Image (spheres, rainbow, N blue to C red):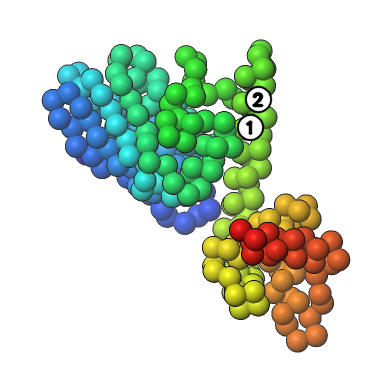
Amino acid sequence: MTSAASPHLSGRLDTLVIPGRVGADRAEFTPRGELVHGCADILARTLACLPATVTRVDLDMAGVHFMDTAGLQFLDVLADHGRRRSLTVTATNWNGQPRRILELAGLDTTDPLAGLDATGPVSATAPASSAVALERAECLHVLQEEVEQLRQAIASRPVIDQARGILMATHGCTSDEAWHILREASQLSNTKLRDVAAAVVASAEADGPPPSAELRTALQRAVARRRRG
């Protein structure tokens, strides 16, 4: 059983597929790709095809490498299916960027369905009727900002890759460490990630302008922190 989602919003075709196997009383799925617009509908159609004898649905999310706020709708559909059918449902093995999104949303990264109440995840636009709802709304606001920054990073990948190469050559760090240096410098200086990368690339050119004093300080702090780590 396999389902495919629509193209990624960035314009790059990177479909979500949900292969799996269905037994007499258990369904196991291994989604692969991205949880973006349309993913919840794909899951809903997949779940609707399950036989009535199934009492447990397990999703191994290790193959999902990107998600935005649509991923929370994906989880809501899964949790709602479990409530309506009185099934046990799980979504485990979250890694990388999707795991970070779950953290920002205030969900348990080992069992995010445990963080969903009887009405599903709290929307960022829903009335904050309790301290928990208010905290979830604040977390989702941060999540939306994080996703937007990631989208901008994808669009700016050539200059970011150049900046990472420069940092790797200059400071003897790994590609992953260079990425974290750029991210941290962006946060410390309150500068967009692509602007930080552009400043690093420009400063490496002959007679290129150096980064601003604030950005230089942020980069130095980020590099120092990585060395200590």
If the image is split into quadrants, where does the C terminus sit?
A: bottom right
- Residue 189 is left or right of residue 155, and the answer is right
Question: Residue 20 or 113: which is nearer the viewer?
Answer: 113
As helix, strand or loop, the secondary structure at mark 2 comes to helix
Kind of residue sitting beneath label 2 = Glu
The N terminus - image quarter: top left
Q: Residue at x 82, y 77 (%)?
A: 209
Q: Which residue, given by chain and number where applicable, does mark 2 sit on?
A: 135
Whether 24 is drawn above or below 152: the answer is above
The quarter of the picture where residue 23 lies is top left
86 horizontally vs 176: left or right: left
Mark 1, other Cα within 10 Å: few <14 / some 14–19 / many ≥20: some
Query: Along the horizontal axis of the image, is 89 left or right of 205?
Result: left
Disc number for residue 139: 1
**Residue kind at label 1, given as amino acid type:** Cys
Q: Position of residue 87 (x, y in %)?
A: 29, 18
Q: Position of residue 118 (x, y in %)?
A: 47, 14
Crowdedness near tag 2: few (<14), some (14–19) or many (≥20) residues, C-alpha within 10 Å: some
